[in-house]
Amino acid sequence: MITFKNVTKRYDNSTIAVDNLSLEAPKGKITIFVGPSGCGKTTSLRMINRLITPSSGTIMLDGQPTEAIDLARLRRKIGYVIQHAGLFPHLTVVQNIATTARLIGIAKKQALGIASELIERVGLDRTFANRYPWQLSGGQQQRVGVARALASDPEFMLMDEPFSAVDPVVRHQLQEEFLRLQRDIGKTIIMVTHDIDEALKLGDQVAVLRTGGILAQIASPQELLSKPADAFVADFVGRDRGYRYLGFVDATSSLAVAAEPAAPLGTEPSTARALTRDRWILVTNAAAQPMGWVDLDQQTGPIRESDLNLSGTLASQSGNLRQVLDAALSAPSGRGVIVGTSGALLGSVRLAEIVTAIESAKAVGMGARS
């Protein structure tokens, strides 16, 4: 557990960066610091490993004040991941990762072995081991940065906007990989981000800070969306609070998946029409995975890949209402496609049924806003 108790950071010009901050980051969970520029997010993070010294108050790691811990030992207990990875350009990937293990006294051969295992654990192929940072994409460098922080097996991890310097597609991949990794390792993590969607997706709890380093609210993502503490939090979380809340509502318990007719590539329009009463037919590949929709009113020959309408998204069998709603809204047929863990078609859900499920969810949880 990481505990802030009445922590303040005041600079010589009397500027207050963090003001009387008190909160707890639970053991084995992810706590996200989020807020506008100048709210003290990064300052708060850096006070934990004493890159910045608090003016007053106490920060504790599992009940032990950080100022009472030798600085070198303190930093060995804490993994630190920054925005641009900060890799050593003259070292290979495996050597970069091994550096933190070497710093805590692990022998070189063993450290390199740990690093080799971590390469795969963060979602990279072992063939990357002997590459240099300049040979990696931004997303790959960030994965190496996370692996390096983990190589010393720290009790705690601090992450300062680790995924903000990559494009949206890579960012989504890194977030998913990070959540998978955290399920395995269960570290106590504090992360800084400016992206409220990222905070809601990754955080077990989210701390919203006001300008001047004042804590506005700390809560689970669900509570932050359904019960913002005041107008500032409500405005910061955004106008799509209701839609975002659906991301925390399980869809599988409230929706019945109906069979969805599907046709393989090469199917003649007349054959496809015999499968459905609708103008739209779902097209699947040899593995029964959805590829896209075809408008039979416009189809004049065998269905080709170039004929597919690719606008529809897919929702997982274990997905949430937000994903299912998006699948239905994005599909030209108005039917949300549901797939299993292998990506194979399970069926579909109609928009009207999703709306009914949303109304039920609102009555149970979202209606608690006040």
Image (spheres, rainbow, N blue to C red):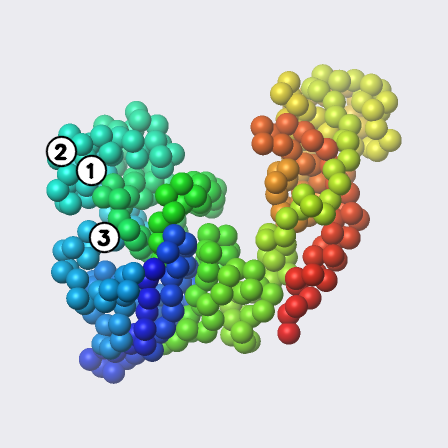
Q: Looking at the image, tell me whether mark 2 or mark 3 is earlier in sequence order.
A: 3
Measured along the vertical axis of the image, is residue 29 above or below residue 168?
A: below
The quarter of the picture where the N terminus appears is bottom left
- From the top left corner, tell me how far across and down residue 166 is, in percent: 39, 46
- From the top left corner, tell me how far across and down residue 114 is, in percent: 24, 34
In what element is the residue under mark 3? Answer: loop
Q: CA distance from mark 2 to mark 1?
A: 8 Å
Depth check: 192 or 293 in front? Answer: 192
Depth check: 284 or 73 in front? Answer: 73
Question: Disc 1 designates what residue?
Answer: 98
Crowding at dot 2, Cα within 10 Å, few <14 / some 14-19 / many 20+, comes out as some
User: Mark 2 and 3 residues: CB-CB less than 8 Å, in contact?
Assistant: no
The tally of labels here is: 3
- What kind of residue is marked 1? Ala
Q: Looking at the image, tell me whether mark 2 or mark 1 is earlier in sequence order.
A: 1
Mark number displayed over residue 77: 3
